[in-house]
Image: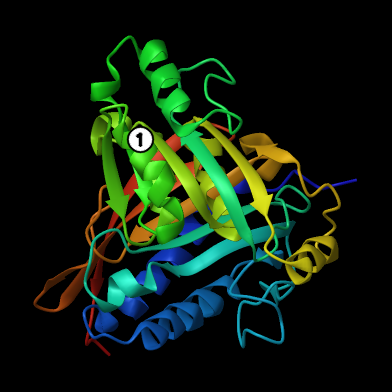
Amino acid sequence: MPNYDFNDRMLSLGLARVSEAAALASAGWIGRGDEKAADQAAVNAMRDQLNKLDISGTVVIGEGERDEAPMLYIGEEVGTGSGPEVDIALDPLEGTTLTAKDMPNALTVIAMAGRGAMLHAPDVYMDKLAIGPGFRNGIVTLDMSAAERVSALATAKGCSTHDITVCVLERPRHEEMIAELRTTDCAIRLITDGDVAGIIHCADADRTGIDMYMGSGGAPEGVLAAAALKCMGGQMYGKLLFRNDDEKGRAQKAGITNFGRVYTRDDLVSGDVIFAATGVTDGSVVDGIRREPGYLTTETILMRSKTGSVRRMIYRNPVGRS
């Protein structure tokens, strides 16, 4: 039986420290044009901090498979080995390109749940659809066209389609969907990277101005986004997309046999979860790293699904002290 119970309250602050450490480590690479160096710095720091936690942790969403990733690979065991058995989903630097170019919405992201509570998503694409809280289930679905989704959400909100804003990852594969969205007179916020942040935007529409997210992106990032929505509220649907038999093989290796299944938010994350994200560059969710003489300051959002709590934390970290 899956072990969904874990000491989320005691572990939550530790998880925030993990996220903060990764962000601080990547700070020196903001705007430097070196994506790999920024990512590696975040990976190293996140791994070091995870290994200080009293958990028996397994990375289920990580930097890649064991032979492809030197650290924080899928299946890697982290923590001291004492404490609760937990699964961990992470992206040490969500938006490596954003960091390298000093563009908005780069984050460090990590989620933790009891053993067996998160889908072991293979490294393939996922068709994603997300909206915020306060709507009946199924108000929008993956079976609808892009235009039908906008119309349905506008009706549910009691507004015009003109008042709906949809977040979409700017990729050639989305050109037809974007063209269809334009016919509804909705607004479209195109993002270059970082669809975890894009989906989180939906859960806080008053702050971000985003009502809905749609389009395809990485399946592992879909699990991370679902963890955030599990805490903040909102609906999410995802369907794995396969380009070849090799990708289907990855899914089978992860224990997935129903290739056409549509996953809900609670399918992607079936138990209680804690989620932390720290801003690297400024964004709509959290502020980026601030520099001042002798200090680096971060903002972290820390959430628990069990209580629905959302905490914003400012960490003023002294630098250059022995």
Q: Quadrant of the C terminus?
A: bottom left
Looking at the picture, tell me which residue is in the foreground, 36 or 53.
36
Mark 1 Cα shell of 10 Å, populated few (<14), some (14-19), many (≥20): many
Residue in view at x 21 percent, y 72 percent: 102
Residue 150 position, x and y percent, is 40, 25
Residue in view at x 26 percent, y 47 percent: 284
Image quadrant in which you'd find residue 74: bottom right
Q: Left or right: where does residue 106 sit relative to residue 265?
A: left
Residue in view at x 62 percent, y 88 percent: 70
Give the vertical position of 216 relative to 192 (above or below).
Answer: above
Q: Is residue 253 visible?
A: yes
Image quadrant in which you'd find residue 79: bottom right
Q: Left or right: where does residue 98 sit relative to residue 113?
A: left
Q: Left or right: where does residue 173 sit relative to residue 205?
A: right
Q: Is residue 10 visible?
A: no
Residue in view at x 29 percent, y 73 percent: 99
Q: Residue furthest top?
A: 158
Callout 1 amino acid: Leu
For disc 1, the marked residue is: 181
Q: Quadrant of the N terminus?
A: top right
Q: Residue furthest right?
A: 1
Residue 233 position, x and y percent, is 49, 30
